[in-house]
Image (cartoon, coloured by chain):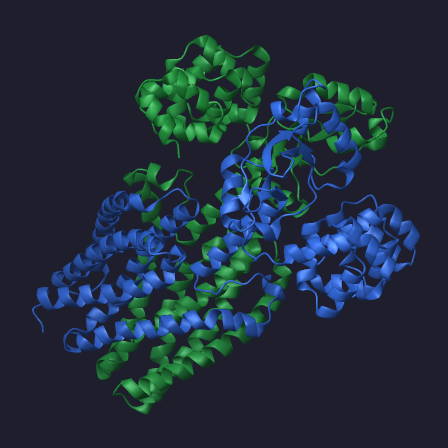
Chain colours: A blue, B green
Amino acid sequence: MFENIIELIEENKLFEARKYIIELNEVDIEQLLGEIPQDKMLRIFRMLPKETAAEVFAEMDSDRQQYIIESITDREINSIMDELYMDDTVDFIEEMPANVVKKVLRNTDEATRKIINQLLKYPDDCAGSIMTTEFVDLKKEMTARDALEHIRKTGMDKETIDTCYVISAQRKLEGEISIRKLILSEPDTLMCDLMETVKSVQTLTDKEETAYLFRKYNLISMPVVDNENRLVGIITVDDVIDVIEQENTEDFHKMAAIAPSEKEYLDTGVISLAKNRIVWLLVLMISATFTGMIIRYFEATLSQVVALTAYMPMLMGTGGNAGAQSSTMIIRSLSLNELEFKDIFKVMWKELRVGILTAFMLAVVNFARIMIFDEVGVLVAFTVCASLFCIVTFAKVVGGMLPIAAKQIHLDPVIMASPIITTILDAVSLFVYFSFATTFLGIA
Amino acid sequence: MFENIIELIEENKLFEARKYIIELNEVDIEQLLGEIPQDKMLRIFRMLPKETAAEVFAEMDSDRQQYIIESITDREINSIMDELYMDDTVDFIEEMPANVVKKVLRNTDEATRKIINQLLKYPDDCAGSIMTTEFVDLKKEMTARDALEHIRKTGMDKETIDTCYVISAQRKLEGEISIRKLILSEPDTLMCDLMETVKSVQTLTDKEETAYLFRKYNLISMPVVDNENRLVGIITVDDVIDVIEQENTEDFHKMAAIAPSEKEYLDTGVISLAKNRIVWLLVLMISATFTGMIIRYFEATLSQVVALTAYMPMLMGTGGNAGAQSSTMIIRSLSLNELEFKDIFKVMWKELRVGILTAFMLAVVNFARIMIFDEVGVLVAFTVCASLFCIVTFAKVVGGMLPIAAKQIHLDPVIMASPIITTILDAVSLFVYFSFATTFLGIA
């Protein structure tokens, strides 16, 4: 994509390369800088216009940010910090070692330092941690003309001017107004007559809840207030998209029994990966010994008809898959707020019918398969298929209900995903199977 | 949330209720209307200002939309269609039966009908299907003053005016300019001097790819061009968030071996649910009989040491979980574009080390557990734990590589999720286990 530019850089024609680079989007510049040697990266970075430099800096990973801060002058740091939006500043500072943080804070003015320290205090999972403080606030008493004038004067440094927020003399959030409405209205109209009611979150509102509101109300930005309803920041939709993808990644990982982490796969070390995985593997392994106990309890039955063993993996596997299907659907519906606890009986009834339907089909197909291919009697085939029917039906109902039940007792419903459901159903499956075997086959 | 309003409605004080309702956000109005009887819903809907009515209408599910269209006059339909954004219009028309579509199209003007028909042609998975045609286009030769004047005149009906697009005389996309920049610049500057380069997609670009670009470049809106680079529409970020959540839901479902569907769980019938689930259950069930064949092959071994059976579920379960962890992580990284095919050896090497590390820990814990609690010899314990070690290591490597390999041969990597990985690993696990048993325990 950037072959020509990289060639110029390799030939040390940095000024010529710069001409093309400044035409690029900041995200592409960041990517380009990642593909060239570090010393040249630094030289080109220092040649960028300060606004672009700040935008590119915000896109970098923390290793490269640290390298740059350690290599440039105090003055350069100062100019980047000036241009960075507050949310990017805080994200960056959070990842830096103490000496770098010191160097950075030394090069920001008193007021900014105060805001940074304030923002650093918000826990990582709340709205305050992703908000920025560069927003347009308009006074209730302003006219549209005043407002536009105010925006012309101060708008350049704001993260968005598309939506402006109207506040009272005590900085309480009163409403919002879009720049579109502002432009299109009579210059003498007052803000308090133009503004519309606005959805807001508090600094400590959960990030996930915030993302849900953005999705529900199709928002582009949203104001954040403190507990006295004073406007303290805004959240923009680009950060919300990151939150959504992060939450989804977390859910995918949890559903595969992996402790969630924020780093990308290739950036995560072997030890961390092993640590994130081992705990659940151990728990599930130990739980599986319970299934072993059931087998040992029925050892006499098994030793009489060893052929029964051959159907165990199929029964456990199918039961597990059937249960995982239901639990996954329900977990996903819960996390999209499409289901609530009051729906538990609707879910049960639905899963029961779906279960009976699928279980019946599976049992019929399986019966046919056994009779055609396996050299076992009708009675064994019947035992296997009757077990299959009960196991799948049971799996569907349990898979549907456990996530809702978990949520009700304030556990993460994701805990009831495939690995746990499968482990539970393994034990149930074998118990049903062996009980049926002793009954139908007349062995004990 | 709306108790007071609902009370007023129940007392038939609709005009009084209306006063409170029009203060609400359109999403909340839609929700409120869902909670009252249909006839009153209709009456209140007809009392809404036409702009609000259109916004509320766009939020409704298709059953209610159909009911409304069938109950209101042609004139009312006309006024709603006038206000609806084109993307919402198309979404709505796609779900309606033929007679309703006819009624709607009869009440739209010729030009709109042409655009609707054009938009309906785009396949469901491409950028064209989520774009809207209400955007601000500015001519290259306009000054900032002309541009603002143009926006003042036409901006009211546009989905967004925050970013405007600059086109040539042939309607080719030349660049973009933010309303902020427009407001802040000298009135006499020309668009071609102010505009910036812009990322665009083609009408047939994949939706998922489009969402990826929004995420990568932190976009709020993006222009869509035809294959001659003529501007034909824009996509806004609120629709992209829906795409992202839909894709994620699809992935969650596919990873649990469910055929994806777009409907919410509670709105999906029992038959559809069963249909979406049965195919994979059947495939996996039949595949599991392969595992049964392995057991039958080793039946002689098993009948000599029936105690071995008790460890089968633990080995299969742990192998499956270990493999599913790796495959889930890799699948997720692939769908976030964090991994490519060229990384396959990095992944292999990483998973090998993670595998050895976790496998070793699991084996040690398991050996201790067997020696303490189970009354079997050291040799059986050793056989089980040696198998466990090999199975888990193998599972990690295979789980990590299969999704990447699948993607390379243009299969959806998600296919290599837990259910398939587990089924494959079940067979491998038992084969390893029984082979070790015949070797170490000296039975045949």
Which quarter of the picture shows residue A153?
Answer: top right
Which quarter of the picture shows residue B238?
Answer: top right
Nearer to the camera, B45 or B121: B45
The reply to whether residue A218 is visible in this rendering is yes
With A369 as the anchor, is B178 left or right in this view? right
Residue A340: percent from the left, percent from the top? 35, 45
With B341 as the anchor, is B282 left or right in this view? left
Residue B259: percent from the left, percent from the top? 40, 46
The structure residue drawn at horizontal position 36% and vertical position 73%, both measured from the top left corner, is A285
Residue B231: percent from the left, percent from the top? 69, 27
Nearer to the camera, A416 or A296: A416
Q: How many marks?
A: 0
The quadrant of the picture occupied by the C terminus of chain A is bottom left
Residue A403: percent from the left, percent from the top? 34, 54
The reply to whether residue B229 is visible in this rendering is no
With A167 as the anchor, is B251 left or right in this view? left
Q: Is residue B129 above or below residue A389?
A: above
The structure residue drawn at horizontal position 35% and vertical position 17%, both measured from the top left corner, is B13
Residue ranking furthest to the left:
A442
Q: Is residue A247 above or below residue B42?
A: below
Residue ranking furthest to the front:
A170
